[in-house]
Image: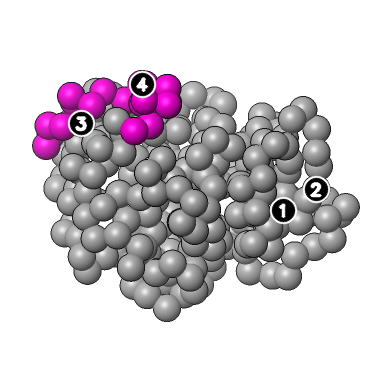
Amino acid sequence: MPALVAPPACVQASFLAALTEYQREGRYRDLDARTLAQPDGFAAYLDELAGEAVPDTPRRADIVPQTTLWWVDGERFLGRLSIRHRLTDALRQFGGHIGYDVVPSARRRGHATAMLAAALPLAAGLGIDPALVTCDVDNRASRNVIERNGGRLWQADDGKLRFWVPTSRPARPADTAPPAPVHAPNRHQHVSGDTGQPTGDVYRSMPRWRPGSPHGRAWSSLTLAAVPAPHCSARPRGTASRAATAWSGGREPDQQRGGSG
């Protein structure tokens, strides 16, 4: 059964096969398959992805912290999803909080719908509610994915549709702009399978404390710490490097092109 997990080392072979498919479409050309085929290169790439969720990781001013998750079934890589911890002006127009895509050969099988459903409780754990999700105006499949997950159309302009998707509360009316998300501590979330229900033990919300706060134990951030799925061993630790450019990095998500389900 597919699950949304922290990127694991055991899917390296299928990830490389998926990368070949993506690059045939002209996508993810910045990822070097030869580097990622090496154990150390792949481990460094996974470390980079994990580091993107840490607020203190050095990054350009226009790049926000994000949590990257992979949709896997056993050792088969099926897709990826990123939860951006906050919005910039650019992400409000193009990208939103959540971006996702499915491997070309695995599309039209419901994976995108299930993957987004599994991510919504995790977004709630980051204090995001509702989540902004966007797609191209002419991408009916991606629109269906968003609407099946409770998305309400908010805006349609510049060739994009923008939806607010509830993560822990009922959807608000489509013509009502939501308040700014409040980043606050939340309960532990356990999400697995292809239903998005908090019944598994794949991912858990974990706090990071800031010492010296006048309130004692104050939240400096809320990151998601992986609990390795039972079908995958934990990834080996590698030395982070820029040898393999991190996937997405807070840029516009790819559900507009490949995130249908």
Q: CA distance from mark 3 to mark 2?
A: 39 Å
Q: Can you tell which mark lies on residue 36?
A: 3
On the question of residue 216 being in view, the answer is no
At 14% across and 48% down in the image, what residue appears?
Answer: 236
Q: In terms of sequence position, does the residue under pointer 4 or pointer 2 come before the other?
A: 4
Amino acid, disc 3: Leu
Q: In terms of sequence position, does the residue under pointer 1 or pointer 2 come before the other?
A: 2
Q: CA distance from mark 1 to mark 3?
A: 36 Å
Residue at disc 1, secondary structure: strand
Q: Which residue is mark 2?
A: 154
Q: In terms of sequence position, does the residue under pointer 1 or pointer 4 come before the other?
A: 4
At 73% across and 70% down in the image, what residue appears?
Answer: 170
Tags 1 and 3 in contact by the CB under 8 Å rule? no
- Residue range in magenta is 21-40
Amino acid, disc 4: Asp
Q: CA distance from mark 4 to mark 3?
A: 12 Å
Tell which of 157 and 26 is nearer to you: 26
Amino acid, disc 2: Trp
**Image vertical order of residue 8 relative to residue 194, above or below:** above
Tags 4 and 2 in contact by the CB under 8 Å rule? no
At 75% across and 65% down in the image, what residue appears?
Answer: 171
Q: Which residue is mark 1?
A: 164
In the displayed structure image, the side of residue 160 where residue 99 appears, left or right: left
